[in-house]
Amino acid sequence: MFTRPAYSLEKYLPLFDRLPRKVVLDYGSGNLRNSLFLHRRGYEVFAVDLPHKTRCKSLPRLTCVFPEDLLSINTKIGVTLCTFVLNQIPDSERIKVFETVAKKMVRGGYLLIETKGFSLFELDTLVIPRGFTRIHYQNGRYTLIALYQYN
């Protein structure tokens, strides 16, 4: 069964396809819809989620990782996806998540966030101090999409 990826991923996919480093970190991968979509397109994917929230599959170029093991990944990431997971991360842990993500990013790589219940100011406050620059955003009826680039 093929599930469509998040709207934000479809929107920015042409930009991601131009990257020389096609390695993706799907933070909050859940049912793997974004991970499998990118895997089918030839990306190397690291699907990150809690053990009870993921349905990870063992495939070449698709690696399942728990959040606490993220720093042990021995590669740099070109794109990090964070779609509809921020609400599930406790306030006290969000800064740590983005600090960890920043340590794994390649310069010029992208961080894509799609979320509900956060303002652009709140996202910028979490992300920009970690070395990212916001390059685009879009308010939807119920969601906020923000695209950042790692400096």
Image (cartoon, rainbow, N blue to C red):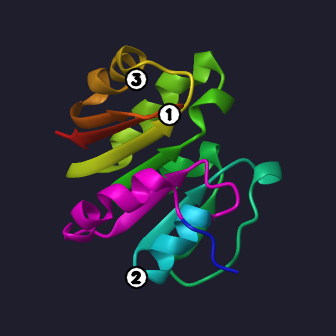
Q: Is residue 20 left or right of residue 91?
A: left
Pointer 1 or 2: first along the chain = 2
Residue 74 in view in this figure: no
Where disc 3 sits, the SS reads: helix
Dot 3 alpha-carbon crowd within 10 angstroms: few under 14, some 14 to 19, many 20 or more: some
Of residues 128 and 4, the one nearer the viewer is 4
Pointer 3 or 2: first along the chain = 2
Q: Look at the image and tell me in which quarter the N terminus lies.
A: bottom right
Q: CA distance from mark 3 to mark 2?
A: 30 Å
- Number of residue marks: 3
Q: CA distance from mark 1 to mark 2?
A: 28 Å
Q: Is residue 33 left or right of residue 128?
A: right
Where disc 2 sits, the SS reads: loop
Residue at 32 percent of width and 64 percent of height: 13
Q: Is 93 included in the stretch rendered in magenta?
A: no
Pointer 1 or 3: first along the chain = 3
Residue at 69 percent of width and 54 percent of height: 30
Q: Which residues are magenta?
A: 5-32
* Residue 146 drawn above or below residue 75: above
Percent across and percent down for residue 12 are 31, 57
Percent across and percent down for residue 87 are 63, 28
User: Which residue, given by chain and number where applicable, does mark 3 sit on?
Assistant: 123
User: Which residue, given by chain and number where applicable, does mark 1 sit on?
Assistant: 143
Q: Look at the image and tell me in which quarter the C terminus lies.
A: top left
- Residue 132, quarter of picture: top left
Percent across and percent down for residue 118 are 50, 21
> What is the three-letter code of the residue carrying label 1?
Thr
Dot 1 alpha-carbon crowd within 10 angstroms: few under 14, some 14 to 19, many 20 or more: some
Of residues 97 and 17, the one nearer the viewer is 17
Nearer to us of marks 1 and 3 is 1
User: Which residue, given by chain and number where applicable, does mark 2 sit on?
Assistant: 42
